[in-house]
Image (spheres, rainbow, N blue to C red):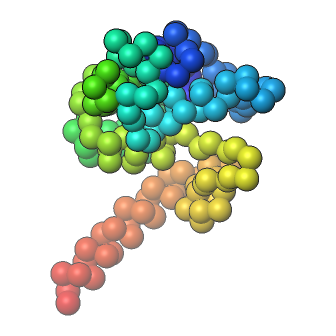
Amino acid sequence: MLTSLTVRNYALIDELHLQFGEKLNIITGETGAGKSIILGALGLLLGQRADSSALLDKNSKCIVEGEFSSNKQLREYLDSNELDTEDKIIIRREITKEGKSRAFVNDTPVNVTQLKELGAMLVDIHSQHETLLLNKSGFQLSVIDSFAEHQDEVDKYRLLFREYTVLKKTTR
């Protein structure tokens, strides 16, 4: 879950710091209020394409940083990608005036592919005419499993299923 977002030198934003609540967060406002700019900055953290045209001051770099709370699935992803595992996940993306971009997860450099994979687990954005994860059966199952509060049984099943598939491959 996104707990805070800091944006510096992005589009019309000189500097912005947002704190988010523990439950549902909704960004609303009039046309032209800047909702899309905030979502664009968040998109950078999720692995979207970056270029120098997004810089407010062309002589300074843009920095977007998000702090996310962690969970078991995220810690497993971080471990499997040899990234530092913390209670909080801090993702930072920098865009230089030359248009080059760098990304970090808990101060460890990552590539855009890793950023996209991690971003897909962290944030689900619903905007007009878009529902990203709601139509994916894997997301629907994770919601049902979470609601049922049977995560231990689900984890046991996954482990047993992996063992089964390995055994099945080795006995062929």
Q: Quadrant of the N terminus?
A: top right
Which residue is rendered at x = 61% and y = 53% of the image? 132
Q: Position of residue 89 (x, y in %)?
A: 41, 27
Q: Is residue 130 left or right of residue 95?
A: right
Q: Residue at x 49, y 20 (%)?
A: 10
**Residue 39, percent across and down?**
59, 32
56 relative to 165 in the view: left or right: right
Q: Position of residue 171 (x, y in %)?
A: 20, 86
Q: Residue furthest right?
A: 30
When asked about the image quadrant of residue 65, the answer is top left
Give the answer, above or below, for where 44 lies relative to 157. Answer: above
Q: Is residue 3 visible?
A: yes
Looking at the picture, tell me which residue is in the foreground, 159 or 12. 12
Closer to the camera in the image, 9 or 126? 9
Query: Residue 1: in sight, yes or no?
Result: no
Indicate the quadrant where residue 64 lies: top left
Q: Residue 100 at what x, y percent from top left? A: 28, 30
Describe residue 43's horizontal placement relative to residue 100 as left or right: right
Q: Residue at x 20, y 90 (%)?
A: 172
In this view, the residue farthest toward the bottom is 172
> Residue shown at 54%/51% (left/top)?
151
